Structure formats: C-alpha cells, structure tokens
Amino acid sequence: MSQGPARRGNEKHKRIDRRSWLKAIGVAGAAGLAGCSGGGGGGGDGTSQSGGGNGSNGSQPSNATNGSALGGDGNETGNQSNETSSGGVPEVGGTYSTITSSSPETLNPLYNTEDGAGDLISYALDLGYGFRPGTEYFPRLYDMTTDQGNVWVAKLRENLEFGGDYGEVTAEDFVYQITELHQSEWAATADASSWPSEVNVEATGDYEFQIELPNSNALYPETYDPLLYPIPMELMQPYVEEQNADGLRQDEELLGLGFAGNMGAYTLDSRNRSSSLTYKRNENYYLRDAEGVPERFSEAPYFDTLEVQIVPESQSRLAALEAGETDSASVPFNRVSKFRNLERTDVYVIPQPYNEVCVYNMRDNGWNAGPGNLFRKKKFRQGLGCAVNKQRLSKGVFRGFADVEYTWQPQWSKWYPDDNSNIMQFGTGDLYGPEATQSRIKEAISDTDYGYSGGNLKNPNGETVTLSLYHSAGQPTERSMADFIAQEFKQNAGINVEVSAIQGAQFSREYWQQQIPDNPDQYEWSEGSNNAGPREVTSANPWDMTVVFGLNTYPLNPTTASVFFQKDSAYNPYGYYPSWNASELFERASNATSEEELQPIFNEIFAKISEDQPMGMLAFPADTIGYATGINGPQENFFSEWDFSAWYRNG
Amino acid sequence: MGLGWYITRRVGWAFIVTFIIVSITWALLAAAPNPEIAQAATQVALQGGDPADAQAAAERARELRGLDAPLYQRYIDYVTGVYTLDWGWSETRSQPVIQAILGALYYTAQYSIPWTLLVIIIGPMVGLYSSATQYSWKDHLATGFAFFGYAIPNFFFGIILLLIFGVELGWIPVIYNTGVPVFSLENARQLAVPVFVLVTGSIGGIMRVSRNESAAFMNADFVKTANAKGVSKLRIYARHVLRPTMVPLSTTMISQLLYLFVGSSLLVEIVFGIPGIGRLSYRAIIAQDTSVVLGFTLFFTFVATIANLLQDITYTVLDPRIDFDDR
C-alpha cells in the first residue's frame, strides 16, 4: 500500500520519506487504510526515522501543553553530541528493540512504497542521502552538487561494497537501475514516477554519474526524486532481459536484503513476517570510515542487535513499553503524561508534516444542501475558516500536541514566511467567531437565494443547511475533531453538520476517487482517479466534507505540494479551482535557480493559499514517541533519526 | 457394509465437496476483474502514456499472469495448483501463500491444540458436574463461571490479564516471542494467558449444552438401574451419562470450535501479538490480498470437511444405534 501526500493514521510512520515525496498520485486510499488501523492520538510507532534532532544529551523532552506543541525546530542544527560524557566513543553492546503495528508488505527496495517498510529497509541498507537538522544535506552513499540546478552530479563514496559476489558499488549500478528499471515501461518500480524519460542519466566515471534535468531545479535533492537504493547490476540483469517484473518483485535476495554488504548499519538476520525482525550489527558499516561525517559514526552502530517487534494492538504496544520490553513505541496523546511520569520512559514530541484538513467537495456531487455549490466561493470558504477555533482544537482534541495551521506549511519549515503579515490567520483572534464567519458567508451568498434566519443558514427552501462530514472509523482523535468542527459550524456558521464514520479505504474508493469517464478525451483534462476531470466528473457517491485524510505539506520542498492546488493536477479529488494563478507561481518556483530566488515566491504562494482557503487548514499534530530512558539519540526535531545508526544506550 | 467402506465413501465425498468448492472459487475469481491489470494500465496512463499504451500495458500484465490462456487451461492450472499446494504469491507478504498459511498455522496450533483439548475435557466435565449437583451452589458457581467466560469479551479480558500479569506482576512477557522452542517452559508461560482467555471464552457454551443434555439422562431408567446395582457414581457419569451426551455435544463442539477458531483466535492473536492464522486472514481481507484470502478459504474448506467427516464417524462410534449402512 503506498504512502503519499494523503495520509493519516497513528499506526503508520509520519515521517517524510522518499515515498511520500515521490508518490503524488493515487495514494489516498493508503491514508484511509492507515487511518483505519490506528488507535487514538499519538504519532508514529516508534520506528520512525524522521523525528528527533536537536535535543541536548539526556535532556527531558519538552512538555508542550498549549499551541506551540512542537518541541523542536526543523531549522535548528542541533547541538547534540552523541559521545559519552567522558568524551569517548560509546561502547558497543546490547540490544535496541522497537515495536511497530503492522508487518510490511515487502522489503524489496525497488517496490516498497510504505514508510514503515522504508524504516525496516534502512536499518540494513542506506539510501543515497538524507538531511540533518536545518535541512542540511547529509551525503550517505553519494554527494550531489550542481552549478545551475539543471545538471546534478552524484559522486559516490569509494568504500561501498555489495554483499555476496557482487563486488564494489559503482556509478554504473545506479545508472543501470534508473535507465533499465525506473525508466522502463514494464518494471513499474516504486520510483518510476521520479525518473521520467526526459531526465537523462549517464555515468561519467566509476564513482560518478550525472543527472540532466529538462528544467533547472534548485531543490532537486529535497524532492527526493534522485534518492536511490544501491542494487547490484548483476542482480537486475536477468529480470531486465526477460522484462520479468514479477520475478524482480519476488527475488529472494532483494526481499532479504542479502546484497546490502557494508551499506547498512545492521544486517537483516531473521524475519518472521507477522511478528518480528532481527538485525545484527554490521562490523563493516561504511560510514565508520567515511569522510565528512561526525566522529560518533566512527564505531557505529552501537548495538549488537536490533529487534523490531510487530504488535498490532495499541494497548499491547504500550504495555510492552511500560514493562520495559521495548525501547520505543508510539504513545497516544492521552497517555503522554502517564508515560512522562514513568521512571523508565521519556516521551518525545516530534513534529511531522501531515496536516489535519477539513476538505470541501467542490465537485458536482458536493454541497448537497441545496442549489449551487457554495464551497466554490472563496468568501464562503473564508467564512468557514473563521468558524473553527484552531487553538481550542489543538488544545482540546490534540491535547496540545499540535500546532495550528494557517497555510500549507508548518511554522518550523524554513519556507514558512518570516514576515507572516500576509498570512491570513483564519480561526484565531478577530478572524474567529460568529460575526467573522457570518459576515463572510453573507457576502458569499448575496447573489443566491440562501439567507440567514435565527442565526441559521437557510437554503432556498427555508431549511437549515445540513452538510455531511466523514471521518475514519476507529480513530477517536479524528472523531473528536469532526465533532468539534460540527459544533463550531453550528455555533458560528449556523450550519448543521452530520458526522459519519466510514472505513478510510471505502471512503477513498467510493467517495474520494472519481469514476474514470468512458471517454476521457472529451474533458479538458483527465489525470487518473484522483482528478479524473473537471467538476462534472465525480465519485460514485456524493459527499460534502471529510477529515479522513491528512495531507503532506512537503516542508523541505513545497513545490512538490503543487499538485494540491492546480485544478488539472494529478491530485485534486475535491475539485478545487484556485482563484490565483497557482500554476504560474509553482512553475516559477520549480524553475528558480537558488534558494534566495525561491523564498519570495513561496511567500506569495503561502499568502495566496491562506487567503483562498482551498480547504479548512486546521492543525499539525506531532508524533509522540515514548523511548526507554537511557537511549541516547532521540530528539524533538523533524529530522530526529537522521543519525539513528549512532544511537546508543547510556550505562 | 462395514465401517471401513463407510469411511471410504465419506472420504470420497469429502474430496468431491472440496473439489466443487475449489471449482466455484475459481469461477468467481475468473469472473472478477483483476486489479493488477487495471493497475498496470493506470500506471502507464499516469505516466502520460496514451490510451493505446495503457491497453498494451494491460495486455502485457494479463499475459504475464497467464490470463490470456484459454479458460479450460486456466482451470486445469488452477486445480493442479490447489492440489499440489501451489497457492500463489501473497502480494502483501511477499511470500508464497502456502508458506504464509503453514507459518501462521504453526503458531496457531501452539495455543489452539491445548485450548481445544482443555475445552473438550473441562467443558463436559464441568457441565456434567453442574448437572449432577443441579441448583446447588456448586451448580450456580459453575454456571456463573461459564457465563462470565461467555460474556466477557476475549479482547478486553486479554488486555486486562496482560496488564495484570505482564505489566504489573511481570509473570508473563507482554510481547510474544517466536524465537522460543515450542516445547519449553518459556513458551508455556507466554501461551498460558491466551489459552486461559480462550478456554474461558469458549467453555461456556459447551458446558451449558453438556449440562442440559446430561440432565436428561440423570434420571433416566438406565441410570437408576445402574444406581440400584451399586455402580459407582464416576462410572455412571462417565459411561451412562457422558456417552449419550457426547452425541449432540460433538456437533456443538465442532461447529463452535470452528467458529471460535476464526473469531476468537483473531482477537487473542492481536492482543498477544501471536502471528497466527487469525491475524493472517484478517490482514489479508483488509488488504484485499486475494491469494491469501483464497488460500485460507481453501484451508478452512479442507478443515471443515475433515471435521465434518470426523463428526460423522464419532457419531457412529459413540452411539451404536446410529446406522451407517444407509448413509
């Protein structure tokens, strides 16, 4: 099941990984499924690779209680040194155990599309690069440089060895993978969408290859498009010759990561698909001898064994954390204070990029309360934006472990405008309450037969407007959020909201995704089931509003978020037509050659988004992860586990 | 016609029944659209390919999966696959289906065999005892125990016991460890609570049926006669009451255990993190992993058919009045 821009679910990792960036299309169902399986509150499941970042050694995690929930700032560079207090390198030994809720579908790096599985793979096989706190590029297998942003050169480390008889890693392995698999029609790899045919890749030396883009892209690494796993060319060749995708998918070496050689901190030792994975320390981990990496990697990793237990039941996972049987597990918001008070656990609040949104259906089967779809009017959406108190939502529903959202970026993102005077802060201050709400709605309905009577919005038949709002079944936090929205809409907008629970996958399939028209050519665009055409193309069932999906705001490279705001993009299930020139602005952002050039463009984009209110943008809940005290490494930062292989246990 | 011929016929019939079910599942599968084909076409479409490319991709996918072969060929391949245990590939687990099922069964058997044995032994015994001491405090206690086990949801009960014995007292591990030997104290320790939860959950029905069924025989003439002849109480209960009680009870037992096998075991497996057949099937259904769903459908078909066969044979052994000649 793929993970992408749309996702919610406490049982899934909420990090931005490469899949999240890559998969801009066709992934809403995953969000639903993730949502279905979750319990209430709390973030990832403890094996997330994104959290942590800049805390000080052994410090108590922040005790966020209101509004500003996020303990860490993605822009901070972090001051932690993982060395022991005596200044030496930590001792190697012991076991690090973590716990996750579900078994991955596959560990085949070429076909994995799940965050959780990505973490499991990453223990035994590093990806090409990563980011440190402050969005600082961290070269793992290769460094990437560019002059103008259209030709990027990837330079490999020279101490990379595959396992088995595959020998050393060369540029040719990567080039072959890109050209013969990702750019092929038959292989349908997870990375296929990252490597369109117009991207030219060629080896320019044994340890160097270059990627030539059709347009310049100053934030190309941040898109995660050039992020690759190393796969031996000899392993791929037989499947390439036969164009055998099933064989490639089912290859035992790929599934068992046996080819990983020295490119993972640990080696996969055993795997029981439903219950556990065990890894052993890799004595030859390449980062130990790598140049330009912090000293603490010199003996990494510091655990002899790494265990990942798969336990589907949330209470059982928490019991394991409490009993000391695991070193990390996700903690629901309502249990954070308990686990903070336990001697043997700490809870870290780790910001993540998925937002809580109330999506309005602007397609023809949306707004079932009367004639004319009022969601299509900017003023009406602004009115709805004034109806929900975001600070109370954060405090009440998310127990303070969420920051309010005004536009499509968390405030810790380096791209969030420094001067936010142009960001309209709907839902707080003067932009909250019945007056702010109803004045805007009245303006929006001035040319219609809708009207207010007795504080209620009436449709032309004189009936109070009643809208449906769907949330994922089995998600208590989401249910609370839906109830809160319903209450606020009633109180401030005079609109009745009927809250309904639904399985995420069912909502995705029957409500969110449109039915592909028989003749797509008759429409101006038809981009697949998440935007199968203009507003007249609809899903099988009508719906008004939903909170089923949390959407990725892509804080490292917001240009990736363009799909959410263009009417003919690959991801527009809600039928949003921007009242601003989204295509042009995002195009400018894509073509910018420097970060300095980008910032003013993003400032403008985020101001426009906040003003246009394409959907109710409500909050950024954090992940709350419990760790055993004494685990040195986790930090309250978006880039938390960038140095996971250098974590160790105190004492 | 003897018992041997009867069993042979019943086995033959069981084979035919499974064959019919296998054929029906094939027909249903053949009639259903294959999501992987649609996915292949969508993939091309999303990459900007034209409709002809998407069609070609769908054809290629169809070809790779052998779906372009004539129907009869596909049917023969399928049936051959089923009976040679080649049940396909699980997309959600990235392993052959038969491996997934056997792997899960290995763990399910570890708690379901003791569970079944305990239920079969304790259930009728408690029921019989309850019936023998009808309306006494012992009967009420046994009835209370039965209803408690029946009423309290296994899921909830399991969590409570886990918190008490795992977290508070530390007597049992919270996380199930697949690495321990099957016949070891450690394994017995980690399976004790799941088995206890299942036994209390399923013993109620069997105990009540055995109590009510045996009550009918407690005052029967043959029991009175045995009493008058001075036969010991134990012998009366075991030979004269339990035996006829077991005939209707065996039906209840088999159907209930089969039902519980799927329902209760799933919940217990989720709470205790046991990677058994319940979790496998549940996840396969949620993830729409058709191969695995089909796999355990076949598995349960075989199990149910064999259970039915055993039940019929049990009847004839337990009650000589049941004649198998005409059946």
Image (tube, coloured by chain):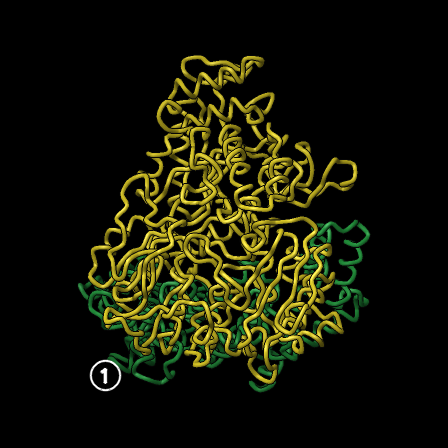
Chain colours: A yellow, B green
Q: Is residue A496 above or below residue A479?
A: above
Residue B24: percent from the left, percent from the top?
Answer: 68, 64
State the image quarter where residue A179 is shown.
Answer: bottom right
Q: Position of residue A427 (x, y in %)?
A: 40, 29
| Total marks in image | 1
Query: In this view of the protein, can residue B138 be seen by the observer?
Result: yes
Residue at image x 60%, y 36%? A585
Residue at screen point 66% across, 69% down: B22
User: On the image, numbered disc 1 is attached to which residue?
Assistant: B230
Q: Image quadrant of residue A648? A: bottom left
| Crowd class of label 1 (few under 14; some 14 to 19; many from 20; radius 10 Å) | few
Say if A572 sits above or below A218 in the image: above
What percent of the width, then of the height, locates residue A549?
Answer: 50, 44
Q: Is residue A569 left or right of residue A423?
A: right
Nearer to us in this view, B127 or A373: A373
Q: Position of residue A479 (x, y in %)?
A: 40, 41
Q: Residue at x 31, y 55 (%)?
A: A348
